[in-house]
Amino acid sequence: MNQAAIEATGLSKRYWLGEHQHYVTLRDAVAGIFTAPVRGIARRLGGERNEGASGANDEEFIWALRDVDLEIAHGDIVGFIGRNGAGKTTLLKILSRITTPDRGRAVIHGRIGSLLEVGTGFHPELTGRENVYLNGAILGMRRHEIKRRFDEIVEFGAVGKFIDTPVKRYSSGMYMRLAFAVAAHLDTEILMVDEVLAVGDVAFQQKCLGKMGDVARDGRTVLFVSHNLLALQSLCNRAYWIDQGRIRAEGSPGKLVADYMQASYALQTEQVWETPEDAPGNDVIRLNRVSVRPSKSGSDSQITVRSPLTIECDYWVREPGVFIKPSLNLYNSQGIQILSAHDNQLADWRGVPLDEGIYRESCQIPGDLLNSGIHRIEFCVLLDGQEEWRANDVLTFDVQDASDFRAGWYDEWEGAVRPLLPWRRERLV
């Protein structure tokens, strides 16, 4: 096909703040007929503010989407990233014709199957079987076409013995499995999926990703919204970054995710809390200071892939005789957990009993281990062998690339880590 699957120009959507607009009754409609001329005169006399004017009424509504242009080709697998409330779901709802835009237009070439929230398009009083046929009919499919796919849908959704039960009695997991199975198996040219991986167990998530990969290989178009950035990168060949209702960037998923993560997390190589009352923690233990720095130079030196790092954590112990064992988790810019570490030298798996006071824990990450990019550290504290609390993202640091051992090749170095491993060559013959 020469034409694009989706063409959107200037899509904008706003929502009113404060008091909700009431539903228009027949009486309101009739009254509107007589009051419309009066309102028109009031507008012309300046008695009513013009909402389209710059700065007028801006405090009364929020733009969920503003001036969005898209062109998505047939067979593209497109991911959308951005913070909660950025406008990703609103965009998919407009493209799915669930919501109408306030401005702009979108042209869709092909039938759409969408899964934007649990049970979208399902009638709670109907059985699973009836909802499958209802959804197929809405898509314009004939009964024999739906029947041909029915067994695949039921098997994928794993709801066989509940298929003739009203879906209002389904758990959220059952709801999601059947809804995704319907969206993915019926004959649609375009599949839109919003955060399906947020519901269900690991096996179901892997099953969904595998099915979306199959759909994409069949030449169908997939639009995928997810906070699982690793899944988005592995599945998609293009991505859009949406920020405050606008498209901030477009490009390859890997590059876009790295830029998004760097913008989302301000670099923080040290944090200090002067008093326990202001520090993260609880009645037993609270942080005093955390830091990450190159081990062999000053604290202001640049961190590179060659740098060994020293991580320090100072904390207040506020009760005597407690068994404390700190640990840390390290994540890279794609949200992949690189490592989890704690003090293995402690003889007791619970830790050691500590008196009240301020203590310092420190550890080292060797150089030539981490890859370049933004990294985040979270601290966890075990109390009597059980996790007591964790402080998320207390440190965020940027590992810069280094030209050593590049041999003139300066493209992106793939992988979660990039250790400098010993190699040996010997001639055998």
Image (cartoon, rainbow, N blue to C red):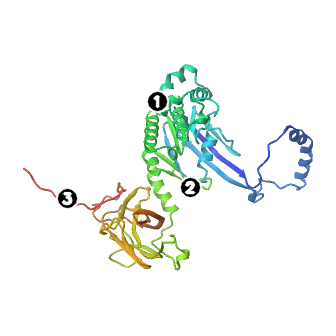
N-terminal of the pair, mark 1 or mark 2, is 2
How many other residues sit within 10 Å of disc 2, few (<14), some (14-19) or many (≥20)? some
Label 1: which secondary element:
helix
Q: Residue furthest left?
A: 429
**Residue type indicated by callout 1:** Glu
- In terms of depth relative to the viewer, which is nearer, 186 or 10? 186
Which numbered circle lies on residue 83? Answer: 2
N-terminal of the pair, mark 3 or mark 2, is 2
Could you say where residue 182 lies in the image, as x and y percent from the top left?
54, 32
Residue 54 in sight from this viewpoint: no
**Residue type indicated by callout 2:** Arg
Label 3: which secondary element:
loop
Q: Are marks 1 and 3 in contact (CB under 8 Å)?
A: no
**Residue type indicated by callout 3:** Trp
Residue beneath the point at 46% across and 50% down: 253
Could you say where residue 301 lies in the image, as x and y percent from the top left?
39, 75
In this view, the mark in front (3 or 2): 2
Residue under label 1 = 155
Q: Residue furthest front?
A: 321
Label 2: which secondary element:
loop
Residue under label 3 = 423
- In terms of depth relative to the viewer, which is nearer, 160 or 68? 160
Residue 193 in sight from this viewpoint: yes
